[in-house]
Image (cartoon, rainbow, N blue to C red):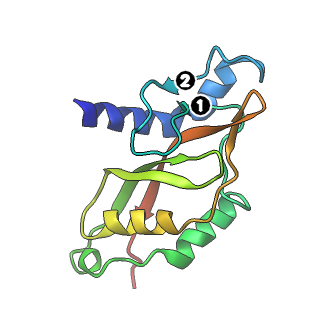
Amino acid sequence: MKKTLITIIGLAVFTSVKAQQQAAGSPNDTSGTILISKPDTSSVDKSPIFTAVEHEPEFPGGTKKFYKFLQNNIRYPAEAHEKNIQGKVFITFVVEKDGSLTDIKVVRGIGGGCDEEAVRVMKMSPKWNPGTQNNHVVRVFYTMPLSFTLQSR
């Protein structure tokens, strides 16, 4: 049940963060803010983890730089290549107040070494620009799909 709930929350967060922010109204309106009620105890910081914030965390340099980072660092696993495994690995993580990524986990994988590769690369990530809520830097829960696709030759 817990795994199902985390998966549902993770997938919903990724696809609905913008809609939640727009539904919240003005930037100072926190009525639309959603918190994960129980922070992960493996994290050092015990402050609340937000799932929707006024200003989302961002990879330094933006989305294009993030894709470039992934392109330069992801290595297609040999097992996945041999078995023609393709698809999206959904990972979750927390962007901490200092921009570091913690609690990196696979919530839906495809196997063949792709799941481990997704975690390995996210652990290499430089610090992100942290998220803010009401002009305060906060911890933010994030879900992200990483695509593994073989090129036709």
Residue at image coords 47%, 68%: 121
Q: Looking at the rendered structure, which numbered label has been put on residue 34? A: 2
Query: Quarter-wise, where is residue 110 in the image?
Result: bottom left
| 119 to 50, vertically: above or below | below
The residues tagged by marks 2 and 1 sit, at their Cα atoms, a distance apart of 6 Å
Where in the figure is residue 2, as x and y percent of width and height?
26, 32
Camera-nearest residue between 138 and 84:
138
Where in the figure is residue 10, as x and y percent of width and height?
42, 38
Query: Is residue 115 visible from the viewing direction of this image?
Result: yes
Q: Amino acid at mark 2?
A: Ile
Evaluate if marks 2 and 1 touch, with contact meaning CB atoms under 8 Å apart.
Answer: yes
Residue at image coords 34%, 38%: 7
Residue at image coords 45%, 24%: 37
| 27 to 130, vertically: above or below | above
- Residue at the spot of label 1: 52
Query: Is residue 148 visible from the viewing direction of this image?
Result: no
Camera-nearest residue between 6 and 144:
6
SS type, badge 1: loop
| 34 to 68, vertically: above or below | above
Relative placement, left or right, of 77 versus 21 is left
Mark 2 closeness class: few <14, some 14–19, many ≥20 residues within 10 Å = some
Relative placement, left or right, of 58 versus 122 is right
SS type, badge 2: loop
Q: Amino acid at mark 1?
A: Ala
